[in-house]
């Protein structure tokens, strides 16, 4: 019998009428011949209320007790949902995470799923019950209650769909699908009919709150087709599958993370291992960092900047201050009034001028870009928080995201779901934790060259001008990194281009450096870009660390780095290319598939 997982978010179970409406949807699916597993979130804003209650008692609650507290929200709603189904004359059983056997690690408030037992759920389903699972919770080895992180019910739903080999996974929420950006922030946003796993993974981790990013890791790994739709209607929403909506569009969506903080460590001795010393301390605290940018070193010292969610600033500063002392850095600065604006799209990996367009839109809107990082399928910029919404609107507009793409090729969604072989899931999981890091390849690209412009003034429009000219010459720019404007109010802008285009790009850079009174241009024809690819690389805090560690041990300096959910790229000295590749292969041997 086909099996369907239906997840109802907080607003979709906010009161008794909504609980009854959700119950009816599940009953209808059962009557249409499905076995039905419901995953239910806490009612309305209940989780927020519980967080608030805790904060009235202490500003540093124990993470274990926080999980004990927050998990009660979901326990209330599953029980009420079961009663609702009973009252409508059908069989249902509610289960907590522990009762299902959702085993997690012990990182309270952001636990990762290790395994899920299906026997009890399957038995209840076979007896004709609708199974109602509490979202967002599990238990660790010592039976402590854990939670998966805010928004984690999506992850419970997709993980259950994967282990139960469900035919579909429906996410019912208060929007009717995934939009090109949060429709609450920009009303002109457009609902997309379809989005690829990689794009959704990236958007979700860059601020598109409609899906918990780790749920998309599961979906991609286990090929679960997700249907995001409104709990208020039966209209089709958005399918999250392997294929993008349109292959021609460079950008499929934009996202905003409003509450970010930047940390800069100034005057870090520019030698292998310095970054490692600092970042391993952060990773130990399970904090994921983003936008790691290192200035090309001067006088043997470099500046390293990166971002973390603002609510992790305090813990990160603790770690950074320790690390900075050990490596002998000059000082640490931070800014907690910044926001990150990103655009995402599979298409940008094949087109020139995408970054340029974005920087242009920002310059025209008078928004100053404080930092830039890119990866194959996303570009992120750091801006002042009070300019963030304007920045988001400008980039949404320039890529015409409100408009339907010209042609949306049809795909067989059923076929996508069915390419998953249950045996594969089992093999995939044998002896491996479900959310374990998966690396599927390490590659080396020796075809690129690096150009750096130092002393770039801190005014809107410089990046736009540089990449305007580079794009006008038809040069494809791969990695772009703009550092934070360190102690002297000036930033450095580095990028990579195909080797054959180096001379031409240097000429452009020199001309613009003169125009904007920059300090100078340096370039290196002999670089190697190494890429580690897989799933959930940014959310697994250890990946960048392993990379740094492996290279540092061999005395290989990392010149540039960028990270996305599906890739970590580092640029090193071209003469060390082969050795660097071997080192990384060794470092990831245990997780390489
Ligand atoms: P639920 O409680 O159902 O899990 P959430 O509040 O977690 O619902 O997610 C739905 C909300 O996500 C929407 O109300 C919307 O404001 C927000 N959102 C953010 N980014 C997007 C996006 N790209 N597309 C759709 N909704 C988005
Ligand atoms: N109730 C939890 C939260 O509000 C989990 C979820 O809704 O996904 O974060
Ligand atoms: Mg949610």
Image: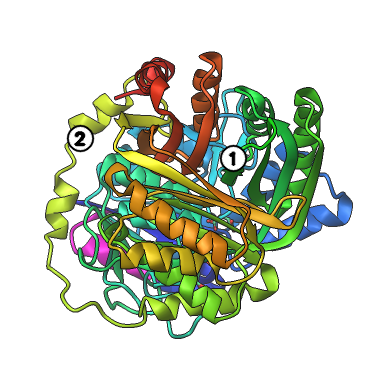
Q: Is residue 92 left or right of residue 544?
A: left
In magenta segment, residue 27: yes
Q: Residue at x 29, y 37 (%)?
A: 447
Q: How far, Cα to Cα, is label 1 from label 2?
A: 49 Å
Please tell me whether residue 492 is drawn above or below residue 274 in the rendered image: below
Q: Could you say whether the residue bearing mark 1 is in a helix, strand or loop?
A: loop
Picture coordinates of residue 169, whole percent (x, y):
31, 55
Q: Residue at x 68, y 56 (%)?
A: 490
Q: Is residue 282 left or right of residue 140?
A: right
Q: Residues within 10 Å of mark 2 (few under 14, many from 20)?
A: some
Q: Are marks 1 and 2 in contact (CB under 8 Å)?
A: no
The residue nearer to you, when weighing 585 against 179, is 585
Q: Is mark 1 within 8 Å of ligand 1?
A: no
Picture coordinates of residue 87, whole percent (x, y):
43, 67
Residue 123 is labelled as none
Please tell me whether residue 559 is drawn above or below residue 193 in the rendered image: above
Mark 2 lies on residue: 422
Q: Which mark is in front, 1 or 2?
A: 1
Q: Earlier in the sequence, mark 1 or mark 2?
A: 1
Q: Residue at x 77, y 50 (%)?
A: 487
The residue nearer to you, when weighing 463 against 412, is 463
Residue 590 falls in image quadrant: top left
Mark 1 lies on residue: 296
Task: Give the magenta part as a residue range.
Answer: 22-35
In magenta segment, residue 584: no
């Amino acid at each position: 019998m086909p099996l369907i997982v239906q997840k109802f978010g907080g607003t979709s179970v906010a009161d008794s009428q909504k609980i009854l409406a959700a119950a009816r949807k599940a009953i209808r699916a059962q009557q249409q011949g499905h076995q039905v597993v419901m995953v239910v979130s806490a009612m309305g804003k209940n989780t927020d209320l519980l967080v608030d209650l805790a904060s009235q008692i202490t500003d540093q609650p124990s993470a274990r007790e926080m999980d004990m507290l927050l998990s009660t929200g979901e326990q209330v709603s599953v029980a009420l949902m079961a009663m609702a189904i009973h009252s409508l004359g059908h069989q249902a059983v509610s289960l907590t995470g522990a009762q299902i056997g959702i085993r997690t690690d012990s990182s309270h408030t952001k636990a990762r799923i290790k395994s899920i037992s299906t026997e009890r759920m399957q038995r209840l389903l076979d007896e004709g019950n609708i199974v109602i699972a509490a979202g967002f919770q599990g238990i660790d080895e010592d039976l402590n209650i854990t939670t998966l992180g805010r928004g984690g019910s999506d992850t419970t739903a997709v993980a259950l769909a994967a282990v139960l080999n469900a035919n579909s996974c429906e996410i019912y929420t208060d929007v009717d699908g995934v939009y090109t950006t949060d429709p609450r922030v920009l009303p002109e946003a457009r609902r997309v009919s379809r989005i690829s796993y990689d794009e959704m993974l990236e958007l979700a981790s860059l601020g598109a709150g409609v899906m918990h990013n780790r749920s998309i890791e599961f979906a991609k790994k286990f090929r679960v087709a997700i249907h995001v739709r409104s709990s208020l209607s039966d209209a089709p929403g958005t399918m999250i599958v392997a294929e993008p909506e349109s292959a021609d569009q460079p950008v499929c969506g934009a996202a905003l993370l409003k509450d970010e903080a930047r940390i800069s460590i100034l005057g870090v001795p520019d030698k292998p291992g310095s970054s490692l010393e600092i970042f391993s301390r952060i990773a130990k605290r399970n904090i994921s960092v983003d936008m790691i940018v290192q200035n090309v070193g001067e006088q043997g010292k470099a500046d390293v900047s990166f971002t973390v969610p603002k609510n992790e600033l305090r813990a990160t500063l603790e770690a950074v201050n320790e690390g900075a002392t050990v490596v002998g850095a000059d000082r640490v600065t931070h800014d907690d009034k910044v926001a990150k604006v990103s655009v995402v799209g599979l298409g940008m990996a094949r087109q020139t001028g995408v970054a340029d367009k974005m920087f242009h839109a920002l310059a025209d809107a008078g928004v100053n870009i404080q930092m830039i990082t890119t990866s194959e399928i996303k570009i992120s910029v750091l801006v002042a928080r009070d300019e963030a919404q304007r920045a988001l609107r400008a980039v949404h507009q320039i890529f015409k995201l409100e408009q339907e793409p010209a042609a949306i090729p049809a795909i067989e969604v059923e076929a996508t779901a069915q390419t998953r072989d249950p045996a594969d899931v089992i093999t995939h999981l044998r002896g491996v934790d479900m959310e374990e890091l998966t690396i599927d390849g390490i590659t080396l690209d020796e075809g690129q060259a690096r150009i750096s412009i130092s002393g770039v003034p801190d005014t809107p429009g410089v990046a736009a001008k540089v990449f305007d000219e580079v794009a006008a010459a038809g040069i494809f720019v791969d990695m772009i990194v703009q550092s934070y404007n360190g102690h002297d109010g000036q930033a450095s802008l580095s990028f990579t281009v195909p080797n054959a285009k180096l001379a031409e790009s240097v000429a452009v850079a020199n001309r613009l450096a003169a125009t904007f009174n920059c300090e100078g241009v340096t370039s290196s024809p002999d670089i190697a870009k190494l890429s580690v690819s897989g799933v959930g690389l940014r959310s697994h805090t250890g990946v960048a660390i392993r990379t740094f560690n492996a290279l540092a041990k061999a005395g290989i300096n990392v010149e540039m780095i960028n990270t996305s959910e599906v890739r970590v790229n580092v640029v090193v000295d071209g003469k060390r290319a082969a050795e660097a590749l071997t080192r990384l292969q060794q470092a990831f041997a245990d997780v390489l598939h």
